[in-house]
Amino acid sequence: MGYRVAVVGATGNVGREMLNILEELEFPVDEIHAIASRKSIGVDVAWKNGTIRCEDVEQFDFRRVDVALMSVSGDFSRQWSPKIGAAGALVIDNSSAWRMDPDVPLIVPEVNPDAIEGAHKKNIIANPNCSTIQLVVALKPLHDAARIRRVVVSTYQSVSGAGKAAMDELWNQTKEVFVLGPSEPKVLPKQIAFNVIPFIGKFRDDGFTDEEAKMWNETRKMLDPSIALVVTCVRVPVMVGHAEAVYVEFEEPLDEDEAREVLRAAPGIIVVDKREPGGYVTPKEIQGEFPVFVSRIRKDPTVPHGLALWVVADNLRKGAALNAVQIAQLAHERGLLGKKALAA
């Protein structure tokens, strides 16, 4: 039996990717609804071999669906996710609104699948931050092998993480550099073309940004609250694909060869690590791919038990839409979807 599925925020980058991945993974869909704000009513989005027309979130009856995949702002989700969950649909939310709520599971299926058993408390499951997802997929098997004490991360995040308007800004600035000079930035805080910006989100009182805080808070919630984590998040002039330089200190010894074998055996990871020109991955090569890729695995000689890694993933796929659909698959496998339909 298939499910009745709503994609809320279906006209955005991640919403469209959710529709693509539902099809690619052959998730059992009997009925699909593309839901958007009033300004997008009537817009057609691709679904399988055709299109479906967006429906107004204000008018839609969410009692008609079993699961709602949300690709919306935090404010929108805070307003709508409880209503949708109360109507009976399982909400899988991609915003930051519910990630640290103690009654809402925060899930990466390769990392903490059993957390889904708590989904009934609010009928909401949170999808982590894009950079956190690829980080914890890489850290989980290493933590199981040698227990992580501390992690230092620098991210290299593509403009698609800030939405279509940021992608357009990079494209337009890049062209303008060779003509009259780039225009003033409107979406990002500084010029992104031929530049990097060491700032994502909003500043906190401690000098870190909320994007950086999301990464350490979410990692601790899913993996281990005792892990010490420090992060610098950087926006780079790349369209799609996030990369991370990750330095890990362990409680127990784990050499680089053992780490490669542990990572190769872990779900959702591909190791590409040859010590030769081109023997590593970059965001360009992994666009459109599902796994998290790990390269440049080497000993960190500055601590007793340390490794350095390079971690790359498609932020629109594993960093957002794919993880959300994988959570829906997990809910299907655990019998948490469609109970309302079965009881009818």
Image (tube, rainbow, N blue to C red):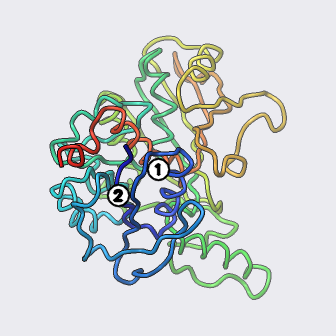
Q: Is residue 52 left or right of residue 275?
A: left
Name the kind of residue labelled 1 in the image: Cys
Dot 1 or dot 2, earlier in sequence: 2
- Pick the quarter of the image with the N terminus: top left
Give the SS element for disc 2. Answer: loop
x 27%, y 67%: residue: 75
Q: Is residue 11 left or right of residue 308?
A: left
x 67%, y 46%: residue: 286
Using the image, determine if residue 12 lies above or below residue 294: below
Give the SS element for disc 1. Answer: helix
Q: In which quadrant of the rendered view does residue 174 lie?
A: bottom right
For mark 2, what is the residue?
95
- Mark 2 packing: few (<14 Cα in 10 Å), some, or many (20+)? many
| Picture coordinates of residue 192, whole percent (x, y) | 61, 69
**Towards the viewer: 161 or 230:** 161
For mark 1, what is the residue?
130
| Picture coordinates of residue 145, whole percent (x, y) | 47, 15
Name the kind of residue labelled 2 in the image: Ser
**Towards the viewer: 135 or 124:** 124
x 61%, y 42%: residue: 312
Q: How far apart are marks 1 and 2 (CA)?
A: 10 Å
Q: Is residue 23 left or right of residue 64?
A: right
Residue 151 is marked as none
Which residue is at the far right? 277
Q: Is residue 37 left or right of residue 143?
A: left
Q: Are the two marked residues, 1 and 2, in contact with CB atoms closer than 8 angstroms?
A: no
| Picture coordinates of residue 300, whole percent (x, y) | 60, 24
- Number of marks present in the image shown: 2
| Picture coordinates of residue 27, whole percent (x, y) | 46, 45
Using the image, determine if residue 219 lies above or below residue 29: above
Using the image, determine if residue 4 lies above or below residue 334: below
